């Protein structure tokens, strides 16, 4: 642990240059990067990948890929590196966060927006108060209920039902709870309702612990306001959402230690969880040529924007659980949590996901770990052809009792 912490550049503690961007600047940057991508980067990337494929220069995790798969992944990696999706978005208003984008719900599912009111102050102690001078619990959090279309939207018996709480990925700087399909997959497979949380993104104003506060608000709404028993809640998070799910569990355990009335969920599903914000595991560099995400470091905009107000939290259990000792997870074992972790063999976050699974097992936590051969980061949500990853995710829900 000490050697890892010593390798964190001290410039992470200087965050003043992370500032919000305006809508005009954002649109201009978007246009410029798209022109650059499609006019130059994409054609050169395709040419480079074809040459490398002909020369049989493929990283081991991509050994079985055909030329079209190699090109698609390389283009996705180049796109995420050069376009607006890899930079801060303008701060969103509450009304903007209430809107639903194009979704993966299909004709068999519906979404219902709800504004969840802030809980009482006793639920926002500890890590939730780590940036109390700058970040405060939102008075309301936009959330979306996902449910089967043939079933009228009704919460009158929700306290007797099982519920999926979905925390979306996107590096804490992008995406929307309805723009990724994992929540919809879960509802379609199980028939249970899903509450998808539109937590605040890091935008130069917000940052850690704002997403944690919003997830706490949604969880308290489920278990305290609606009366859903913790044993009937499955928390699902992908990528940064997996990081948020981990932080939520640690915070709930802290609340219980403080004597606050709260129950823990029965099951947690972590899809390609972001588990080390110091970016020190080997696969960050080792899989740089075969993942859809480019390698990043503790100096990347993702990390620096998320930790704008709390840079000292970079290696703690809320942001970098894979760096902890297994004793940190004993509380998970004591409350009989079951955890499913899925990673892709070809993704840059692979090794930290492996390390997190091992820590949980060493702590005695019921853990189901899966590595999908030749698969990239967050395949369940970003690769519509990743049937094996999707089936494994749904099997995990079944294993967890949902």
Image: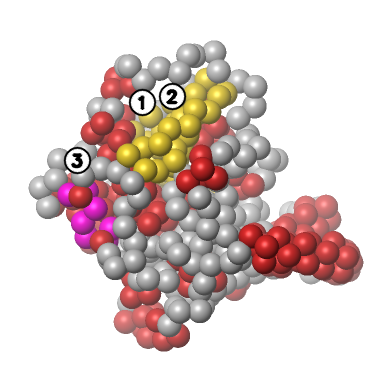
Q: Which residue is mark 2?
A: 192
Q: Position of residue 399 (x, y in %)?
A: 41, 33
Sort mark 1 into few (<14), some (14-19) or many (20+) by Cα contacts within 10 Å. Answer: many
Q: Quadrant of the N terminus?
A: bottom left
Q: How is the image coloured?
A: secondary structure
* Whole-number angstrom distance, CA of label 2 to CA of label 3: 22 Å
Q: Are marks 2 and 1 in contact (CB under 8 Å)?
A: yes
Name the residue rendered at 59%, 60% in the picture: 89
Where residue 162 is drawn, which disc sits there? 1
Return the x and y of residue 322 as percentages of the image width and height. Answer: 38, 64
Residue 262 has which mark?
Answer: 3
Quarter of the image where one finds residue 385: top right
Position of 356 relative to 111 (above/below) = below
Question: Marks 1 and 3, how far apart in space?
Answer: 17 Å
Q: Is residue 335 left or right of residue 189?
A: left
Q: Which residues are magenta?
A: 122-128
Vertical comparison of 68 with 79: above or below: above
């Amino acid at each position: 642990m000490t050697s890892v912490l010593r390798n964190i550049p001290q410039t992470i503690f200087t965050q003043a240059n992370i500032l919000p961007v305006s809508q005009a600047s954002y649109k201009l940057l978007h246009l410029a990067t798209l022109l650059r991508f499609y006019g130059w980067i994409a054609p050169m990337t395709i040419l480079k990948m074809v040459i490398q494929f002909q020369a049989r220069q493929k990283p081991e995790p991509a050994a079985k890929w055909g030329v079209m798969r190699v090109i698609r992944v390389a283009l996705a990696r180049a796109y995420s590196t050069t376009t607006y999706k890899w930079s801060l978005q303008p701060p969103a208003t509450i009304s903007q966060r209430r809107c639903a984008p194009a979704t993966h719900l299909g004709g068999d599912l519906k979404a219902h927006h709800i504004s969840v009111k802030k809980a009482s102050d006793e639920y926002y102690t500890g890590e939730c108060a780590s940036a109390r001078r700058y970040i405060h619990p939102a008075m309301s959090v936009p959330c979306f209920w996902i449910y089967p279309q043939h079933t009228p939207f009704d919460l009158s018996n929700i306290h007797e039902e099982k519920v999926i709480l979905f925390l979306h990925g996107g590096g804490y700087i992008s995406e929307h709870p309805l723009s990724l399909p994992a929540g919809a997959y879960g509802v379609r497979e199980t028939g249970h309702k899903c509450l998808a949380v539109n937590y605040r993104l890091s935008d130069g104003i917000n940052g850690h612990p704002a997403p944690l506060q919003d997830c706490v608000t949604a969880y308290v709404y489920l278990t305290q306001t609606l009366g859903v028993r913790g044993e009937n809640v499955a928390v699902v998070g992908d990528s940064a959402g997996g990081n948020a799910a981990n932080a939520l569990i640690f915070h709930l355990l802290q609340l219980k230690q403080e004597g606050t009335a709260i129950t823990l969920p029965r099951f947690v599903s972590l899809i390609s969880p972001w588990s080390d914000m110091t970016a020190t595991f080997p696969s960050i560099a080792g899989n740089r040529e075969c993942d859809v995400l480019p390698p990043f470091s503790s100096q990347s905009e993702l990390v620096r924007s998320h930790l704008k107000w709390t840079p000292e939290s970079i290696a703690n259990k809320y942001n970098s659980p894979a760096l902890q000792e297994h004793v940190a997870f004993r509380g998970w074992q004591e409350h009989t949590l079951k955890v499913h972790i899925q990673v892709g063999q070809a993704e840059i976050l692979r090794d930290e996901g492996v390390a997190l699974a091992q820590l949980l097992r060493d702590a005695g936590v019921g853990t189901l770990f899966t590595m999908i051969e030749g698969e990239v980061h967050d395949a369940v949500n970003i690769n519509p052809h990743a049937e094996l990853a999707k089936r494994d995710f749904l099997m995990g829900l079944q294993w967890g009792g949902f």
